[in-house]
Amino acid sequence: MSSQTIDWQVLPFDKLTTVQLYQLLQLRVAVFVVEQTCYYQEIDGKDLAPQTHHVLGYKDDELVAYTRILAPGVSYQEFASIGRVIVDKSCRGTSVGYDLMSRSVELAQSMWPSSAIKISAQEPLEKFYNQFGFEKASAMYLEDDIPHIAMIAPAT
């Protein structure tokens, strides 16, 4: 599958339709809470932060890819952030994840060019995130009982 089959949209919270909000919350809960059996407060208030943007990827009107882009000071005081990185099971192993992260990094860099980007990455995905300029910045830690590492991509 190539990115031509995905309809990409980037929207701040107040421009999301109720259907889009429902879809993104449904996908986030399906993957992070149910699939990964992580019981945590998924709706954390960061979606409402003034400069938060949501990257949505649709295939045939179904949300199959998603990230949340956060301004410096929302998750990390000195860093912009990309989080809630999701590719639906139906699109894993294709170029959709690569396209999603490429778009997300470009967006964060264009919005905050003087800010490095920090992510909390699942440890087995370190090499995937290396492709986008992220380097390991911490020892492994458990987040919701899943091994994670902090990773940082420098400012542009």
Image (spheres, rainbow, N blue to C red):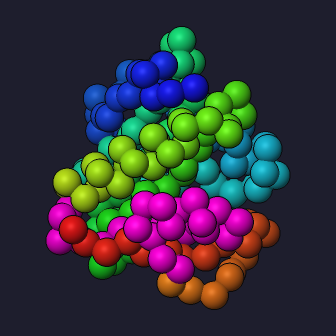
Name the outermost residue toward the bottom: 139
Give the vertical position of 20 relative to 14 (above or below): above
Q: Residue at x 70, y 28 (%)?
A: 90
The range drawn in magenta is 112-136
Q: Residue furthest top?
A: 60
Please identify the quadrant where the N terminus is shown. top right
**Residue 113 x, y percent position in the rendering:** 18, 64
Compared across the picture, whether 38 is left or right of 134 comes to right
In terms of image quadrants, where is residue 38?
A: bottom right
Asked if the magenta segment contains residue 125, the reply would be yes
Which residue: 79% across, 44% down?
Answer: 35
Relative to 104, does residue 70 appear above or below in the rendering?
Answer: below
- Viewer-proximal residue among 128 and 141: 128
Quadrant housing residue 134: bottom left
> Is 118 positioned to the left or the right of 97 in the image?
left
- Identify the image quadrant of residue 95: top right
Is 97 left or right of 134, judged from the image as shown?
A: right
Q: In the picture, which quadrant includes the C terminus? A: bottom left
Residue 98: x percent and y percent?
50, 45
Total marks shown come to 0
Q: Residue at x 39, y 40 (%)?
A: 54
Query: Is residue 39 covered in magenta?
Result: no
Compared with 61, 35 (above or below) is: below
Q: Position of residue 142 (x, y in %)?
A: 72, 76
User: In this orientation, does residue 88 appear?
Assistant: no
Query: Residue sitting at 20 percent across and 55 percent down?
Result: 111
For the question of whether residue 69 can be seen, the reply is yes
In the picture shown, does residue 48 fall above or below 140?
above
Q: Position of residue 147 (x, y in %)?
A: 73, 72
